[in-house]
């Protein structure tokens, strides 16, 4: 089973905008096809799953043309046609992964996705921290052991240092690895419950890509 996490920067490649979080691709480069190729390379076996942050769907993207309904399942907590930045999980159509409800109320359901694989007795929570309220809810997820694995874009390296103090989880990413290229830092992380033996995890390094301003985490 391969589990991956990737902030796709709204299909805008390495471009950024200080304006509203909208699709921003001034040269109209086709990052959609490249991101689909990346997802295809990560979804090979039935149990593989990819968590994407900053996922959107609009007149410029047309997600179901990129990720055809016949091959993929896309899981989200909100309608990603109506929200400008979502955390989603993507699997192959015959996957046994299922979306499950969060155990907490949140103003930002688009920033969380919780997936369960009942056959493997495994639960994964994907997150994207962009607000102090979200940060507090992520803290609660660590305290209550919301999932066996908590991963995503935590957006703040100092905050990641705080989360590393929770004894129940360990991070797979070292500070020396670069996940967010503009400031050359590791703000994306995978936290694994200490109930999962280290010998069961194969993680070597991040996967470099120019399809986003973030790199890919996969294990």
Image (cartoon, grey):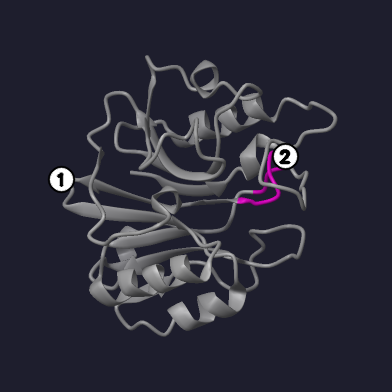
Q: Nearer the viewer, residue 205 or 67?
A: 67
Between residue 211 and residue 56, name the one nearer to us: 56
Query: Residue at position x 26%, y 64% from top?
Result: 146
Q: Is residue 129 magenta?
A: no
Callout 2: SS:
loop
Q: Is residue 211 magenta?
A: yes
List x then y, in percent, for residue 211. Answer: 69, 38
Vertically, is 85 above or below 167? above
Pick whichever of labels 1 and 2 is earlier in the sequence. 2
On screen, residue 215 versus residue 219, left or right, reads right
Q: Secondary structure at mark 1?
A: loop
Q: Residue at x 65, y 35 (%)?
A: 11
Give the image quarter of residue 9: top right
As measured in the structure, the alpha-carbon distance from the residue carrying label 1 to the one carrying label 2 is 35 Å
Q: Quadrant of the N terminus?
A: top left
Rendered image: mark on residue 118: 1
Foreground: 5 or 87?
87
Picture coordinates of residue 98 (x, y %)? Answer: 24, 39
Residue 54 on image: x %, y %: 56, 45
Q: Which numbered dot is residue 13? A: 2
Determine whether 140 is above or below 149 in the image: below
Up/down of 53 relative to 135, above or below: above
Instruction: State the predominant SS element of the stretch in magenta.
Output: loop
Identity of the residue drawn at 23% across and 70% down: 195
> Label 2 crowding class (10 Å Cα cut-off): few <14, some 14-19, many 20+?
many
Residue 160 at x, y = what percent?
Answer: 52, 75
Q: Is residue 83 visible?
A: yes
> Residue at image x 23%, y 46%?
100
Q: Which residues are magenta?
A: 208-215
């Amino acid at each position: 089973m391969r589990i991956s996490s990737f902030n796709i920067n709204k299909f805008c490649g390495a471009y950024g905008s200080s304006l509203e979080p909208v699709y921003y691709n001034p040269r109209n480069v086709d990052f959609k096809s490249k991101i689909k190729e990346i997802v295809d390379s990560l979804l090979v076996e039935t149990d593989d799953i990819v968590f994407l942050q900053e996922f959107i769907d609009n007149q410029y993207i047309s997600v179901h043309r990129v990720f055809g309904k016949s091959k993929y399942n896309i899981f989200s907590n909100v309608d990603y046609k109506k929200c400008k930045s979502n955390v989603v999980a993507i699997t192959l159509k015959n996957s046994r992964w299922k979306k499950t409800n969060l155990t907490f109320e949140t103003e930002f359901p688009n920033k969380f996705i919780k997936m369960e694989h009942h056959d493997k007795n495994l639960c994964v929570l994907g997150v994207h921290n962009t607000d102090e309220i979200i940060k507090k809810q992520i803290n609660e997820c660590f305290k209550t052991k919301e999932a066996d694995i908590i991963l995503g874009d935590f957006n703040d390296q100092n905050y990641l240092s705080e989360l590393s103090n929770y004894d129940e989880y360990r991070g797979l990413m070292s500070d020396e690895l670069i996940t967010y290229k503009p400031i050359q830092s590791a703000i994306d992380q995978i936290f694994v419950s200490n109930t999962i033996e280290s010998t069961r995890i194969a993680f070597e390094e991040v996967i470099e890509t120019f399809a986003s301003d973030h790199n890919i985490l996969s294990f």
